[in-house]
Image: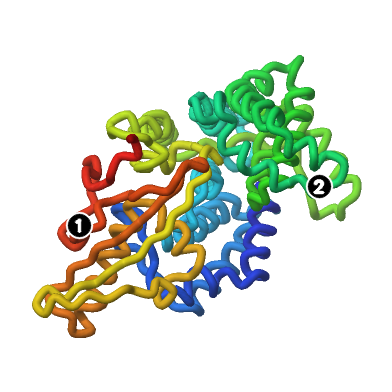
């Protein structure tokens, strides 16, 4: 119910801010996830219909009516909108998609049958959400065990001084020791919070820590609904008695047709349950292994970003770039500078200018676009300067390289320059 409410409010906020138009309709070009360039961008009316469909699915999800169908609607609608443009990728959007997928497998109530335990569901129903949250937190914590985060307090040393105008605590936040304190606390929190949530004796204090941690990060860094999502999701670690007490209180303040949970309902087994459990095993094996793929790539992960996404690396770096693209006619030799604003919105340009795979995608788009405009055998090069964690800007890629001759692939991107002296 809490998850469904956040999905409803998040979608409503997206529509109210007119982000459907800004994110998906206005831009001339959309950056695509590797392997998902086939995903179509539907016309405006269809995109709005999908978002209104997500609102309806969220309401059904909250009420429990046609629960699994509602979960499927949320999964397909939300995942589709995220696949449209890579520049809007966030770890918590990925988490929401995965959670919606798991909800599609959640058992639904059925009538009591002989020899069934009333009011029970299989342990894996609860365990699959706990395992997903464990992966998210532990990987986020392990990723913080690096020299920049722990020994240099970066990027918090850059970000926290911006909060110096907050009443009472602003000057404390801006003080250098605070960045080190927050860095170490953040690492320890992510690595250990699941352990304390699992233990009954420490669970209440651990959840207070969850509330405090995510409220602080939400206030300081304005990271959307992510703090609320994690505060709601971690309630799964509490006992069934805890949830039943909440439901009884909600029912006491609601009409009879709401929260009408009947104790004579029991678990209705899934069709092909063993197959479902096997698929869940493969799903979690993938979630454990895929974030580790960065080990297969050389160089600084934060610089190349090869294997960075889908690995639960949250707010680990301050990175910015500027990218200028030049299109050259391969026959006449004439070269011109591209105005990125003609094709991208500000957010797209900001994200593209520091991520190599997006730079390559955009270069290919420009080559194809100008070829249709009459440029013969177009060559596209880019001057991209990137700064990482406050260090001086330096070239990300060879500015003489014709990017039209480079293809994106799983192999290491040898055309990315090193950031080491």
Q: Are there few (<14), some (14-19), or many (20+) residues within 10 Å of tag 2?
A: few
Q: In which quarter of the image is the C terminus?
A: top left
| 417 lies left or right of 116 | left
Outermost residue on the left side: it is 331
Tally of numbered tags: 2
User: Which of the numbered marks, if any, corresponds to residue 113?
Assistant: none
122 above or below 226?
A: above
Residue to which mark 1 is pinned = 401
1 and 2 marks in contact (CB < 8 Å) = no
Question: Is disc 1 placed on a helix, strand or loop?
Answer: loop
Question: Is disc 2 placed on a helix, strand or loop?
Answer: loop
Q: Position of residue 245 (x, y in %)?
A: 83, 33
Q: Position of residue 95 (x, y in %)?
A: 53, 43
Q: Position of residue 73 (x, y in %)?
A: 52, 58
| 196 or 405: nearer the viewer | 405
197 above or below 400?
A: above
Q: Which residue is drawn at 83% across and 39% down?
A: 169
The image quarter containing residue 12 is bottom right
The image quarter containing residue 295 is top left
User: Which of the numbered marks, if any, corresponds to residue 166?
Assistant: 2
Q: Which colour scheme is used?
A: rainbow
Visible residue check, residue 118 = no
147 above or below 158?
A: above
| 58 or 169: nearer the viewer | 169
| 242 or 196: nearer the viewer | 196
Q: Which residue is drawn at 55% across and 45% down?
A: 92
Q: Are there few (<14), some (14-19), or many (20+) residues within 10 Å of tag 1?
A: some
Q: Residue at x 28, y 31 (%)?
A: 296
- Mark 1 vs mark 2: which is more N-terminal? 2
Q: Residue at x 24, y 52 (%)?
A: 398
């Amino acid at each position: 119910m809490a998850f469904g409410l956040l999905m409803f409010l998040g979608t409503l906020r997206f529509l109210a801010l007119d982000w459907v138009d800004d994110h998906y309709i206005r831009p001339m070009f959309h950056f695509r996830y590797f392997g998902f360039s086939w995903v179509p961008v539907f016309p405006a009316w269809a995109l709005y219909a999908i978002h209104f469909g997500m609102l309806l699915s969220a309401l059904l999800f909250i009420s429990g009516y046609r629960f699994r169908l509602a979960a499927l609607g949320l999964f397909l609608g939300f995942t589709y909108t995220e696949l449209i443009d890579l520049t809007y990728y966030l770890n918590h959007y990925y988490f929401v998609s995965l959670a919606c997928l798991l909800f599609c497998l959640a058992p639904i109530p059925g009538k009591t049958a002989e020899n069934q335990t009333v009011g029970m569901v299989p342990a894996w129903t609860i365990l699959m959400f706990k395992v997903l949250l464990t992966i998210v937190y532990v990987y986020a914590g392990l990723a913080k065990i690096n020299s920049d985060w722990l020994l240099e307090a970066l990027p918090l040393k850059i970000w926290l001084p911006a909060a110096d105008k907050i009443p009472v605590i602003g000057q404390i936040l801006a003080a250098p020791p605070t960045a080190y304190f927050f860095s170490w606390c953040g690492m320890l929190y992510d690595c250990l919070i699941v352990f304390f949530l699992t233990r009954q004796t420490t669970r209440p204090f651990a959840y207070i820590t969850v509330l405090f941690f995510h409220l602080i990060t939400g206030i300081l860094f304005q990271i959307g609904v992510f703090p609320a999502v994690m505060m709601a999701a971690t309630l799964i670690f509490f006992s069934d008695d805890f949830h039943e007490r909440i439901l009884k209180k909600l029912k006491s303040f609601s009409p009879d047709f709401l929260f009408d949970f009947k104790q004579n309902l029991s678990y209705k087994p899934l069709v092909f349950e063993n197959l479902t459990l096997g698929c869940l095993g493969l799903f979690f094996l993938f979630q454990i292994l895929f974030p580790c793929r960065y080990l297969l790539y050389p160089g600084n992960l934060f610089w190349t970003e090869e294997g960075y996404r889908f690995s639960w690396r949250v707010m680990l770096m301050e990175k910015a770039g500027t990218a200028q693209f030049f299109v050259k006619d391969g026959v006449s030799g004439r070269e011109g500078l591209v105005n990125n604003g003609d094709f991208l919105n500000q957010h797209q340009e900001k994200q593209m200018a520091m991520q190599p795979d997006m730079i390559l995608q955009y270069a290919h788009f420009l080559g194809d676009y100008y070829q249709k405009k009459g440029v013969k055998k177009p060559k596209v090069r880019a001057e991209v300067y990137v700064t990482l964690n406050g260090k001086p800007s330096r070239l990300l890629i060879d500015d003489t390289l014709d990017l039209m001759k480079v293809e994106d692939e799983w192999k290491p991107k040898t055309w990315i320059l090193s950031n080491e002296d």
